Amino acid sequence: MTKDECKKVVLDIIADIAPDEDLSNVKPDVRLRDQLQLDSMDFLDIVMELRKRHGIEVPEAEYQQLASLDSSAEYLTPKFNALAAKS
């Protein structure tokens, strides 16, 4: 999976948990919480959806890795690719 595909996965999850948010102008290098009306429960929902939909575990100590789209892609791409290699 490419970094752009990972960004799309994260945006798709945000679209589902925060359907009123306009995701068309999300800047990839700015913290998501600074751009969108996401609270800590929304953020936890993102982590839970990554696990439920894709089998990606994000330990609490690594939540900050998901702060922006760029950092999310950097963190998630190797995890997705490791899962794909196992199957």
Image (cartoon, rainbow, N blue to C red):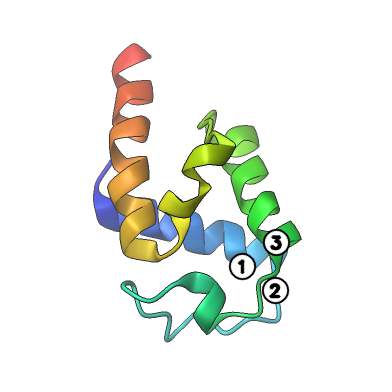
Real-space Cα distance between discs 2 and 3?
16 Å
Q: Nearer the viewer, mark 2 or mark 3?
A: 3
Closest to the observer, 24 or 78? 78
Real-space Cα distance between discs 1 and 3?
16 Å
User: What is the three-letter code of the residue carrying label 1?
Assistant: Ala
Give the residue drawn at x 65%, y 34%: 52
Q: Residue 17: image x %, image y %?
A: 70, 62
Q: Residue furthest right?
A: 41
> What SS does tag 3 mark?
helix
Closest to the observer, 13 or 79? 79
Q: Which residue is mark 2?
A: 19
Closest to the observer, 60 or 49? 60
Q: In the picture shown, does residue 47 fall above or below 14?
A: above
> What SS does tag 1 mark?
helix
Mark identifier at residue 71? none
The image quadrant that residue 49 belongs to is top right
Q: Which residue is mark 1?
A: 15
The image quadrant that residue 68 belongs to is bottom left
**Answer yes or no: do the residues labelled 1 and 2 have beta carbons within 8 Å?**
yes
Q: Residue furthest front?
A: 61
Give the residue drawn at x 57%, y 85%: 22
Mark identifier at residue 40? 3
User: What is the three-letter code of the residue carrying label 2?
Assistant: Pro
Q: Residue 50: image x %, image y %?
A: 56, 41
Q: Residue furthest top?
A: 86
Near mark 2 (Cα within 10 A), the count class, few <14, some 14-19 or many ≥20, is few
